[in-house]
Image (cartoon, grey):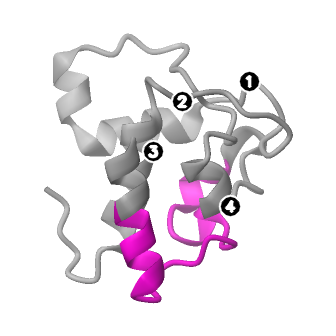
Amino acid sequence: MGIGALCVAVLVDRRLLKYEDLVTKYWPQFGQHGKDNVTVSMLVSHQAGVPNIFGYDVDENTIRDRNKMGEILADQKPMWPPGTAHGYHAITQGFLVDQLLLRVDPRGRRS
């Protein structure tokens, strides 16, 4: 989880991201189900409200499919109103940060 936060910090330092930016600025689909107010800061500090994946059977093939994981995470309903609580996103944090980084990458690398 620390590596993801470090990657985000590098992009902030390079002025490609701002902590106060809405995640939807880079990943519009993420705003579904009341997640439209999640900031980059809330995402990296485990306040987005999506610590787990519900309603999908996620197997090894799904995990390897970055596009599918992006769709699944965007479709998740938050377990609490984003920004009002903290819950360790141990299952989803790496995938969430990965999706953000993919969309901010100035070289447009997707794999």
Tell me residue 3's x, y (percent). 32, 51
Tell me residue 90's x, y (percent). 46, 25
Q: Mark 4, residues whose alpha carbon is within 10 Å: few (<14), some, or many (≥20)?
A: many
Q: Check disc 4 and report its element: helix, strand or loop.
A: loop
Give the Cα distance between marks 4 and 2: 15 Å
Tell me residue 23's x, y (percent). 60, 62
| Residue closest to the eye, 35 or 4 | 4
Query: Going 54% across and 30% down the picture, which residue do you hit?
Result: 89
Sequence order check: which comes first, mark 2 or mark 1?
A: 1
| Figure check: 1 above or below 98 | above
Residue indicated by mark 3: 96
Residue 101, picture quadrant:
bottom left
Query: Going 71% across and 31% down the picture, which residue do you hit?
Result: 78
Give the Cα distance between marks 2 and 1: 11 Å
Give the label on residue 79, or none: 1
Q: Is residue 75 left or right of residue 37?
A: left
Amino acid of disc 4 = Thr
Residue indicated by mark 4: 39
Give the Cα distance between marks 4 and 3: 12 Å
- The residue at the far bottom in this view is 15
Q: Check disc 1 and report its element: helix, strand or loop.
A: loop
Q: Check disc 3 and report its element: helix, strand or loop.
A: helix
Sequence order check: which comes first, mark 4 or mark 1?
A: 4
Q: Is residue 11 left or right of residue 50?
A: left
Residue indicated by mark 2: 89
Amino acid of disc 3 = Leu
Question: Over which residues does the magenta segment extend?
Answer: 7-31
Residue mark closest to the camera, 2 vs 1: 2
- The answer, for residue 107, to whether it is visible in the render is yes
